[in-house]
Every structure is written in C-alpha cells, then in structure tokens.
Amino acid sequence: MLYFVVQSIIAYFNYPTQTSVSFYDEWPQNFPAVTICNNSPFVYDSFIGSFLNYTNSLNLTHTNDTTEFSFQQARYIRDFLIYKLNRNESVTDFYYPLESMLIKCIFNGMNCSVNDFIQFVSPVYGVCYTFNAKVDHTSKG
C-alpha cells in the first residue's frame, strides 16, 4: 500500500502534460478593429448652456455658472439626455466629432478618412468610432 501512495505522489509531482503548439504564418495579416473614444464624453462648451437651461427650468439647480460643474448637477445629466431624445432633439452636438480627434489615418500604405469609421454610442465615453480593416474603405490612395 505504501508503494501505491509513493507512486501517486511521484506521478503528481511529475506534472504529466501534453502540449501541442501550431504556428500558422498567414499573409497578409488581418488587422483588428480599432476604436477611438474621447475620455470626456461631452464637448463642455456645447453641452453646458442647454443643460443649465434644462436644470434651471425644472428648478433642479439654480446656477448660471458655466465654469464649475457640481455633483448635484451631474446627477441630472442622464435625465437631460433622455429628455432631449424623447423630444426627438439631436444630442450629437454634445459629442466630440471624429474630425476633432483623428489627426492622420493610414492603413496598409493607403490613406483612410473619417468615412472609414463606424460610429457607436458608449454609455461611458459618449460617441466612439471604430475602424475595421475588413470593411471596404472609401478612400483610395
């Protein structure tokens, strides 16, 4: 019996494994999608005036100070955006356009432009833009 216990312990510490590694060299390599977001979801100058009108009209906050943003005001941002969307009002002016963030875009030696990005809304970062190499691009050259 001691023999089997010792054999079991030896087998355990040998860590027997079987590993199979394969390497495939594919050319050309597919480039992954790249997403660009601004860390600040809103263009403050575009947002603050309309937001203060909303909060003041509902007596939520009473301030015309556009230099500081209080915690009390921040609680109403979500309500403000829902209010605007429910009234079919555009909120795109509040977000950073890709043109303000993208300096230059080159993929596989070809120029790409803002038309090669797909826009989506992130609940954290506002509007984000994704470049996917598998999508046909509009820019040639």
Image (spheres, helix red, strand yellow):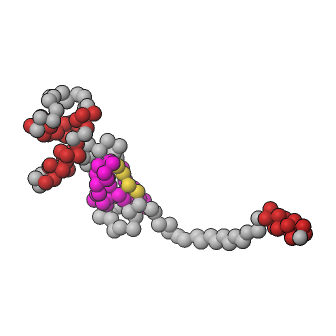
- Where is residue 72? Give x, y as percent: 24, 34
The residue drawn where x is 40% and y is 64% is 133
- Placement of 86 over or under 79, stated as above or below: below
- Where is residue 128? Give x, y as percent: 32, 53
- Where is residue 31? Give x, y as percent: 45, 63
Q: Nearer the viewer, residue 9 or 34?
A: 9
- Left or right relative to 90: residue 99: right
Q: Nearer the viewer, residue 89 or 108?
A: 89
- Residue 109 colored in magenta in the image: yes
Q: Nearer the viewer, residue 58 or 97?
A: 58
Magenta extent: 104-131
The residue drawn where x is 39% and y is 68% is 134
- Placement of 29 over or under 54, stated as above or below: below
Name which quarter of the figure residue 50 lies in: top left
- Residue 45 colored in magenta in the image: no
Q: Nearer the viewer, residue 13 or 107?
A: 13
The residue drawn where x is 36% and y is 51% is 36
- Left or right relative to 22: residue 80: left
Q: In which quadrant of the rendered image does the N terminus lie?
A: bottom right
Whether residue 98 is visible here, answered yes or no, is no
Q: In which quadrant of the rendered image does the C terminus lie?
A: bottom left
- Left or right relative to 106: residue 89: left
Name which quarter of the figure residue 100 lies in: top left
- Where is residue 37? Give x, y as percent: 34, 49
